[in-house]
Image: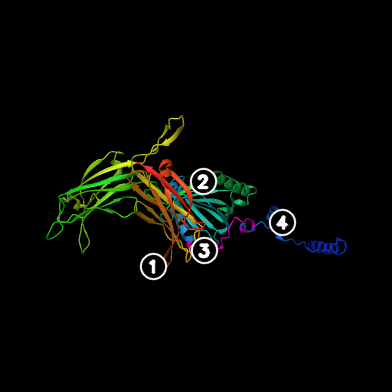
Amino acid sequence: MGLVGGLLGFGVGLPLGIAVAYLVYLRLFAPRRRLQDPIIRPLRDLDSETLQTTIPDIPLWMKCPDYERVDWINKFIFDMWPFLDKAICNTIRSVIRPTFDQYVGQYGIKSIEFGHLTLGALPPTFQGIKVYEMREKELVIEPVIRWASIANVIVKVKVHSFQVSAQLLDLHIMLTPRVTLKPLVPSFPCFANLCVSLMEKPHIDFGFKLLGGDVMAIPGLHRFVREKISKQIANLYHWPKLIQIPILDEASGATKKPVGILHVKVIRAMNLLKMDLLGKSDPYVKLRLSGEKLPSKKTSIKMSNLNPEWNEHFRFIVKDPETQILELRMFDWEKVKMHDKLGMQVVPLRLLTPYESKLFTLDLLKSMDPNDPHNKKNRGKLVVELTFDPFRDDSNSTILMSDGEGNVSVKRDVPPSGGLLLVSVENAKDVEGKRHTNPYAVVHFRGERKETKIIKKTRDPRWNEEFQFMVDEAPVDDKIHIEVVSKRRGLRLPFRNKESLGHVDINLVDVVNNGRINEKYHLINSRNGMVHVEMKWSTV
């Protein structure tokens, strides 16, 4: 009994004695320091290093003027995140599923599946974004992304009769990627490829549990794994290395550049079906090149004729002769009801030899489905002649000319054949109307007129629209007329509805000789207005 009392007294008395001694020390012997008023300095007096040390998490849009504040994006992502979380997780399940299936049946693995998959309730945030202005047809942005997620991913693996679980949680990411949208095209979403690279080594932190035990609690392992992952990602994607994600299908033709001109001559048709009850048929042909969203071209209508002759010529701009096809559809014209289909056929452009004309006699079909029983019926024939003229890479040759007095000059040989003139109206600056400024550009060339879209209420419109003109001979003696016009929106008097903001006439001889011109022109009848135009000439 005495031993138990002694131990109890020692256990209680020792901590109590230490506490009393510490209080006496603080009261009698500890040095007393007088509290001083804090030194207050405005932030503008601090240099960047002191500012970063003092307030390390200050947003970049406050420290760097070239970064823009994008709270509206963060608000948008926050409101959409519950739906984005489910959509992203479903995508991860579908993408990873084939990988899991590859290991099932190996090493005694019976099944691999997600036990739990969520990215958490906290979305990524943009602390700022920087946009670069590029002359090329691309857009470069650098967002600063911070994501302190409460993600929870559990993968369950069944090996023989045992089940092993691995858990990834509390994923933290800090990175600064460079995102390049190129090339910019006139098809939604207006860019063909998404290129991503990292401007600095990313910071990645996460928790990892295996069989319920925290693996990252092992001394030294957490730091080693985190540094190793960040280093490997930086080696793969640090600028100028990048990952390219295709957005638009190249087969659509949106990302292709013109490579030649297809000449089509619709000659005749023979033994067509009789579609009219009291007569014959009123046939015409519609022509379309795949990969293009332009309206189909049509022949004239031959009334009451089962063996019509057209001998009509058409031209198409070719972007990919290996994949594009010419679609030919014949219809019976009707005055009131819908036009009846007489037949159709296609011609792949890969069957053509450049610069050589080829005659095709095509059997008209009900559809291009080889299993369609209606294709066995004789619907007549269509005769067409096709010629593919590729653009010449080196269309202009140079020769030396002498004036007889020993002076030698270089003159470019003007190609005698025709070709394609591409006119790209990029933007305009300092255009202003007296009554309104809703500018658009009008391009006039050899009787053709083409317009850009209207940009509302701006003196510096940006169109980035391209127009194509096919000509039979080089336009060395021609001019192209570009006018910037403002159009009032809504119903107004006709004479006050439009207003010219300036125009420019550009000689095309330099475009033909040089192959390409990219210039800014001062607008005539404008105070300070300018228009940026890029033109390219390709000959066949």
- Mark 2 and mark 1: Cα distance apart in space: 54 Å
Is label 4 in a helix, a strand or a loop?
Answer: loop
Please tell me whether mark 1 or mark 3 is closer to you in this view.
1
- Mark 2 and mark 4: Cα distance apart in space: 37 Å
- Binning the other alpha carbons within 10 Å of mark 2 as few (below 14), some (14 to 19) or many (20 upward) gives some
Q: Residue furthest left?
A: 278
Amino acid found under the numbered disc labelled 3: Phe
Q: Position of residue 460 (x, y in %)?
A: 50, 58
Residue tagged 2: 242
**Looking at the magenta stretch, what is its main secondary structure?**
helix
Question: In this rendering, would 196 be left or right of 380?
Answer: right
- Mark 3 and mark 4: Cα distance apart in space: 34 Å
State the residue in front, 242 or 359.
Answer: 359
Answer with mark 1 or mark 4, whichever residue precedes in sequence: 4
Is label 3 in a helix, a strand or a loop?
Answer: helix
Residue tagged 1: 494
What residue is at 58 percent from the left and 60 percent from the top?
69
Is label 1 in a helix, a strand or a loop?
Answer: helix
Q: Is 70 within the magenta?
A: yes
Q: Which mark is residue 76?
A: 3
- Mark 1 and mark 4: Cα distance apart in space: 61 Å
Q: Which residues are magenta?
A: 61-83
What residue is at 42 percent from the left and 36 percent from the top?
411
State the residue in front, 514 or 215.
Answer: 514
Q: Which mark is residue 46?
A: 4
